[in-house]
Image (cartoon, rainbow, N blue to C red):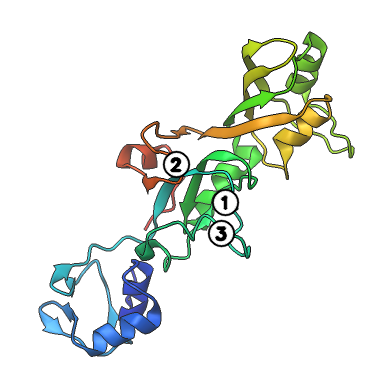
């Protein structure tokens, strides 16, 4: 890889904002190959050189991937004035320019992948790649065989927009409540709610369970997150460093 500015390297790794990093470099907190560097614009190749920050070695990685169990009441849009998915992260992740690979509605819970790998996000979200997204859904009332067929064949929404075919698994159903798993490969605006609204049903609860082969960790409580494991990264179309 090409050499990069020292302050940019450390900022991208989540050690602080560019202004904070510059102050720490000026204080002598950073060394390269055992030599203290006080110039924030110093060019360094983190693969070829040993970079230490406050006595600890910096292990460089170009991209970060987080699995978040989004709680209801938090928005996905990072430019919103409301509390968003970046606001609830630890400070070290707030300087990496992470974005959600696929948004969820404010009142929807479940899996969001946060990353600064834009190409990966595009690839996993593109309907052409056919990465299924699994949702657990609770609606008011049952679904008839004809309605199931509409969902599975690719239905027309109330505004005339066409949805690609989906898959349905009915878990429990009676006249008052239906619990089901829905599998779609698109991510249209409010798509799941709009699909059931077109059938005359209201979504009472919605949670995303998986995106492609990445499944929400059962050990993550709502609002908790962790970095993706090496095994999980192998199931993502990640960009190469």
At 69% across and 17% down in the image, what residue appears? 177
Distance Cα–Cα, label 1 vs label 3: 6 Å
Q: Which mark is residue 199?
A: none
Q: Is residue 229 left or right of residue 34?
A: right
Q: Which residue in the protein does label 2 denote? A: 236
Q: Nearer the viewer, mark 3 or mark 2?
A: 3
**Among the 4 quarters of the image, the one containing residue 165:** top right
Distance Cα–Cα, label 2 vs label 1: 25 Å
Q: Nearer the viewer, mark 2 or mark 1?
A: 1
Q: Are marks 1 and 3 in contact (CB under 8 Å)?
A: yes
List x then y, in percent, for residue 50.
Answer: 16, 71
Q: Is 182 above or below relative to 175?
A: below
At 17% across and 73% down in the image, what residue appears? 52
Q: Is residue 155 left or right of residue 70?
A: right
Q: Which residue in the protein does label 3 denote? A: 83
List x then y, in percent, for residue 36.
Answer: 15, 85
Which of the two labelled residues, at mark 1 and mark 3, occupies the earlier sequence position? 1
Q: Is 4 above or below relative to 23?
A: above
Q: Nearer the viewer, residue 21 or 48?
A: 21
List x then y, in percent, for residue 83.
Answer: 56, 59
At 63% across and 31% down in the image, what residue appears? 205
At 61% across and 45% down in the image, what residue appears? 104
> Mark 1: which secondary structure?
loop
């Amino acid at each position: 890889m090409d050499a990069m500015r020292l302050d940019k390297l450390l900022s991208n790794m989540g050690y602080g904002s560019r202004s904070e990093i510059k102050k720490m470099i000026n204080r002598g907190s950073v060394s390269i190959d055992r030599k203290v560097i006080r110039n924030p614009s110093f060019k360094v190749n983190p693969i070829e050189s040993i970079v230490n920050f406050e006595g600890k070695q910096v292990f460089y990685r170009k991209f970060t991937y987080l699995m978040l169990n989004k709680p209801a009441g938090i928005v996905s849009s990072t430019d919103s004035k409301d509390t968003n998915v970046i606001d609830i992260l630890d400070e070290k992740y707030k300087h990496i320019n992470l974005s959600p690979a696929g948004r969820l509605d404010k009142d929807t819970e479940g899996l969001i992948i946060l990353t600064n790998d834009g190409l990966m996000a595009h690839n996993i979200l593109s309907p052409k790649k056919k990465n299924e997204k699994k949702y657990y859904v609770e609606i008011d009332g049952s679904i008839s065989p004809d309605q199931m067929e509409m969902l599975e064949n690719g239905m027309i929404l109330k505004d005339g927009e066409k949805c690609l075919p989906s898959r349905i698994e009915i878990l429990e159903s009676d006249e008052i409540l239906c619990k089901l798993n829905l599998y779609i490969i698109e991510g249209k605006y409010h798509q799941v709610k709009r699909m059931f609204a077109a059938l005359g049903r209201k979504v009472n609860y919605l949670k995303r369970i998986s995106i492609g082969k990445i499944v929400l960790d059962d050990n993550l409580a709502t609002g908790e997150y962790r970095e993706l494991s090496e095994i999980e990264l192998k199931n993502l179309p990640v960009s190469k460093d």
